[in-house]
Image (cartoon, rainbow, N blue to C red):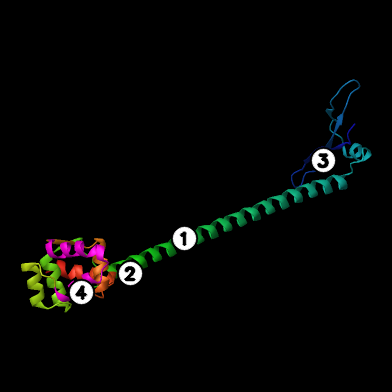
């Protein structure tokens, strides 16, 4: 048998000036397991007068104190729930602001990279080297760069005679590669920038990869 508890409290007020005093009654609830039953059943008393409620252990002061405590507990729970909601809202706002800052930073970084790329692309000599140039462009560019004389450039184009610096570079190659180099330089009508021998001969003439790219760009413009 469960402990009896305050199940209902009813207060009946009266209008101002009424001769009839206010009244109240109490209903007490209890869970009782009847003989032979497996589950407890709820049982409620009838409406008890103040005197009956007092006799049952529920004086008015105790009833009001219990109601007040329950109301305050409910209020505190509501206040706590509201505070938790505010904290969750503030956390969501902070997270959204952090996400916006991250997006803004990423956009700034992207714009900075785009600006740098545009500057590099606009810089002189930043265009990619041409894949191939003619023999005339090749020897003319070397002559303009001072690597060979103009007469040597003309002779190379007209007769296939290699300019002295290039002939010396060919002689510096391994013996097994010299003939192919002479055939390429004397007989080719176009020179591919990506040909493996270009890098070898360029190194012999003092040209690194960047210098060869620049030479090819200058030659392509001739």
Sort mark 3 into few (<14), some (14-19) or many (20+) by Cα contacts within 10 Å.
few
Front residue (pair 40, 108) = 108
Sort mark 2 into few (<14), some (14-19) or many (20+) by Cα contacts within 10 Å.
few
Q: Nearer the viewer, mark 2 or mark 1?
A: 2
Q: Quadrant of the C terminus?
A: bottom left
For marks 3 and 1 on the same chain, the one whose residue lies earlier in the sequence: 3
Q: Are marks 4 and 3 in contact (CB under 8 Å)?
A: no
Q: Name which residue lies at 16% across and 65% down.
A: 185
Residue 167 on the magenta span: yes
For marks 3 and 2 on the same chain, the one whose residue lies earlier in the sequence: 3
Q: CA distance from mark 2 to mark 4?
A: 42 Å
Region rendered in magenta: 163-188
Q: Nearer the viewer, mark 4 or mark 3?
A: 4
Q: Which mark is residue 116?
A: 2
Per the image, label 1 sits on a secondary structure element best described as helix
Q: Which mark is residue 100?
A: 1
Q: CA distance from mark 3 to mark 1?
A: 63 Å
Q: CA distance from mark 2 to mark 1?
A: 24 Å
Which residue is disc 4 drawn over? 168
Q: Name which residue lies at 38% across and 63% down.
A: 110
Per the image, label 3 sits on a secondary structure element best described as strand
Which residue is disc 3 drawn over? 23
For marks 2 and 4 on the same chain, the one whose residue lies earlier in the sequence: 2
For marks 4 and 3 on the same chain, the one whose residue lies earlier in the sequence: 3
Q: Nearer the viewer, mark 4 or mark 1?
A: 4
Q: Name which residue lies at 10% across and 73% down.
A: 153
Residue situated furthest front in the rendering: 175
């Amino acid at each position: 048998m469960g402990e009896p508890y305050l199940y209902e409290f009813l207060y009946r007020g009266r209008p101002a000036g009424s001769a009839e005093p206010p009244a109240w009654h109490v209903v007490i609830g209890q869970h009782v397991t009847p003989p032979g039953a497996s589950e407890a059943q709820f049982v409620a008393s009838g409406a008890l007068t103040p005197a009956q409620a007092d006799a049952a252990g529920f004086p008015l002061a105790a009833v009001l104190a219990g109601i007040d405590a329950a109301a305050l507990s409910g209020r505190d729970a509501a206040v706590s729930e509201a505070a938790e909601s505010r904290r969750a809202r503030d956390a969501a706002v902070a997270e959204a602001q952090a996400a916006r800052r991250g997006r803004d930073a990423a956009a700034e970084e992207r714009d900075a990279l785009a600006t740098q790329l545009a500057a590099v692309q606009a810089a002189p000599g930043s265009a990619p080297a041409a894949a191939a140039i003619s023999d005339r462009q090749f020897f003319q560019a070397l002559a303009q760069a001072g690597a060979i004389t103009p007469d040597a450039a003309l002779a190379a184009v007209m007769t296939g005679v290699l300019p002295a610096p290039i002939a010396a570079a060919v002689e510096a190659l391994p013996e097994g590669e010299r003939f192919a180099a002479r055939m390429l330089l004397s007989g080719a009508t176009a020179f591919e920038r990506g040909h493996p021998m270009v890098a070898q001969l360029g190194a012999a003439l003092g040209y690194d990869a960047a210098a060869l790219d620049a030479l090819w760009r200058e030659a392509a413009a001739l």
